Amino acid sequence: MPHYSGPLLTRSMAQALLAAHEAGAAEWTGSLDLGRSSGNATLHADAWQWKGVHYSYPHTLKDRTIYYWDGDEFASVSRFSGSLIKLVPTEWGAPTFEIDGIKMLPTAKESPFEDARRKVALVEPRGKVLLDTCGGLGYFAACCLEAGVACIQSFEKNADVLWLRTINAWSPDPDAPASGGRLQLTHADVSQTIVQIPDASVDALLHDPPRFGIAGELYSQAFYDQLARVLRRGGRLFHYTGSPNKLTSDRDVPREVAKRLEKAGFKTQLALDGVLATRR
């Protein structure tokens, strides 16, 4: 899907734009891509202009919501098809997303993009072929590209999440020149398609599944055996688990994960909010 290139607004950004207009300013300077860059918008009496396109002034935007121009008006970056999936602003610029109100990326202490960068560094992606099992907004993939990965194969099961990626300015575009053809993004369930990946064909793995109660198959011994099969000996895996004993009925999920990974053929250690494992 082609990536959106128009403005992205939050309530605070819209208020700043309107305040400049009401004060009689001819221009407003700020970010219209969630902090990725800064630019100028030209303010007219009944519309404002950015990158040669005219937009109506927004007036009734909600908090905790990101808006994009759908061709007629500013609409929220959200979809409902069984679950409400929504792009949500953060104080860090890079947004998170929610599924039925449940936040899918950590944002309390730092940007979700910076959080991804620290985790990606653990598998040392430079020059490697890497498998990203649950792509989400693509922050792992973006950080791998930034770090010089040779090739990254990323899977995402949810079509609505893939749509969020096309709107989010922080999500990497596989077709953009900056990606250099190194990102392969596939709409598929990795728990099923992993059997098609050849043995020992990847150098590193990133596994960021939804919580256990939503996607237990991605924590199963059978799936971990597949991860071990596709990863070359000595290759590294980072498995996000979240903090121990939260939303998991008092289970110590990181240690349960480590135990299963060891049975699959990994040497493990707890790292950050997950498990870092090396293929034996």
Image (cartoon, rainbow, N blue to C red):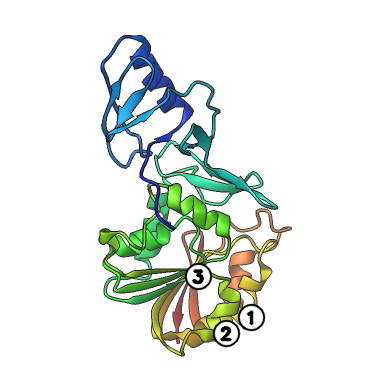
Along the polypeptide, which appears first: circle 3 or circle 1? 3
Three-letter amino acid code at the position of disc 3: Thr
Q: Residue at x 64, y 80 (%)?
A: 221
Q: Is residue 33 above or below residue 250?
A: above
Along the polypeptide, which appears first: circle 3 or circle 2? 3
Q: Is residue 28 above or below residue 238?
A: above
Tell me the distance, in whole angstroms, between the alpha carbons under discs 3 and 2. Answer: 14 Å
Where does label 1 land, which residue?
Answer: 221
Q: How would you rate the neighbour count of disc 1 (Cα within 10 Å): few for under 14, some for 14-19, many for 20 or more? A: some
Where does label 3 land, which residue?
Answer: 133
Three-letter amino acid code at the position of disc 1: Gln
Q: Going by the image, does 204 lie left or right of 62? A: left
Q: Are marks 1 and 2 in contact (CB under 8 Å)?
A: yes
Q: Going by the image, does 29 lie left or right of 77? A: left
Residue 234: x, y in percent? Answer: 38, 84
In front: mark 3 or mark 2? Answer: 3
Where does label 2 land, which residue?
Answer: 225
